[in-house]
Amino acid sequence: MDGLVRGAAAIVGVAESDLGAVAAEISPIDLMAQGIHRALADCGLGLRDVDGLICATAQSRTSGLNLAEYLGISPAFVDTTILGGSSFMFHVAHAQMALQLGLCRVAVIAYGSTQRTIGRRHASVREYNPYETPFRPFLPATAYALAASRHMHQYGTTREQLAAVAVAAREWALMNPVAWEKEPLTIAEVLSARMISYPFTVRDICLVTDGGGAVVMTSAERARSLKKPPAYVLGCGQAITHANISSMPDLTVTGALQSGRAAYDMAKLRPADIDVLELYDAFTINPILFLEDLGFCSKGEGGSFVEGGRIAPGGALPVNTNGGGLSYCHPGMYGLLLLVEATRQLRGECGRRQVAGCETALAHGNGGVLSSQATVILGTQAAV
Amino acid sequence: MERISQSPLAVYQQHLDRGELAYQWSPAANRAVFYPRVICPFTGSDRLEWRLSAGRGTVYATTVTHPRDGAPYNVALIDVDEGFRLMSRVEDIAPDAVAIGMRVRLRIHKPAGEEPAYPVFVPVLPTLASPVSGGGLARGPVESA
């Protein structure tokens, strides 16, 4: 991404808010504030240091106003870009822009959702689309199912291969103490679960949980003086290809192709240089599409690529080490939690699920119905 | 400056009410535009012409969505021969018998009550009268119960 300087900014603090099912009457702004408080403590900064405020939630139309008031701050830089679950990867690029230009010195990016507590219908109201709504698509599941149908038709991808993504996520989740799912999962169990939209059963589809969190970003220079090793922003890329699934140009190719290329170009890295991947897994087809479009296998080979535990613990390529949206936590717009896990992997904080020698991490966000794609590549000091 | 006298959606809907599937044509881009809009997404021009589709197309993608209550139903993306794609469903066959590549033709669905008419599709070839097994036209994804 021209203009953003490789390694000029870093993620210095990360935190989850309460996850899963939060206390009654907790608001999304409560969760953002809790996440910010924890993320600032994580890096040794305080609320008075924050002069850049970035947030997004489907549950508050003017979340920037509400969060600034709640925290009692009047930030110099504000951004509330909302493009679905990938919003937070866009936010990282925007924060770096603001930091590089001196528009702010410490930026926080926050998210909160209580969709489980109040129900998805209330948390994320669907807009009426006269060209789609009459056909009763159960969105977003029906849209992703249509994309999966194309991949299966063109490349012979199987339901078992889709299920392998869910099984790998579950194996990682069993090593994450805060993951929602606690029991093992088999391919047969995925296939025989309740059908939602063919080829997806309920086990091919992400959780519906509450949750949120925050990340703190500052300049590389300031980052080195803080509590924990910085996760430097090596590369950012983004692409919007459509809003509605009926306008997606090719259902087997996502904007991750462009966002990945831009991020690799800025980072001066190739897929083979990436140690750990955090890919937005709202549905089991997603990691398959993103592994292809981000260059980890050829187009059409994603299904066979994920077979045999390749992306599971102990496999050749660690993917979604927190257990993913499929088994760890999926609070509506999940992208922020990918950045949290990528940073923790680079710091070596992940306990049993820690990937050994992790120097580079790729966090890929997806929004809408494969509509917005944004990639962030992070690295340790050694990778800068 | 010319004011917009009728919304693109209103024109589209009027055609549907007359039993026609209308779409826009961009002379500058030399291609179809769908859904209908005020500005051509290929050229940025506001010169868009209305045309009528002959109502033939091919299934591009398909799924069977299972509601919590009620029968499973088809949702499909149809590539219409004039060069545009829309969301719709294929009727007259079992929802899981709808297959990618299947040739389909237009049928205007007029719901009872206030709901406006919308375009659905049916297979071009007649199917055997066995909706449970899927008709035998082309094999769709077969679901394990």
Image (cartoon, helix red, strand yellow):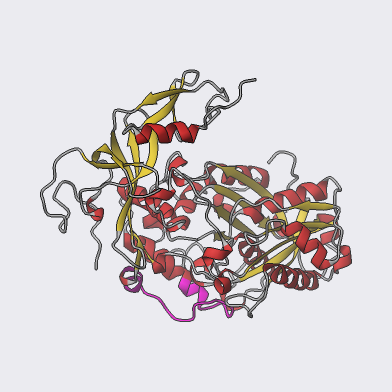
B92 in the magenta segment = no
A177 in the magenta segment = yes
Q: Quadrant of residue A186?
A: bottom left
Residue A309 appears in the rendering: no
The answer to whether A132 appears left or right of A122 in the picture is left
How far from the left and from the top, in percent, is residue A191? 32, 68
- Check the picture and name the quadrant holding the N terminus of chain B: top right
Q: Is B111 or A251 nearer to us in this picture? A: B111
How far from the left and from the top, in percent, is residue A183? 45, 81
The part of the chain drawn in magenta is A170-191
Question: What residue is shown at x 58% (from left), y 64% (from top)?
Answer: A123
Question: What residue is shown at x 36% (from left), y 56% (from top)?
Answer: A304
Q: Is A151 or B69 nearer to us in this picture? A: B69
Residue A195 appears in the rendering: yes
Q: Residue furthest top?
A: B27
- Check the picture and name the quadrant holding the C terminus of chain B: bottom left
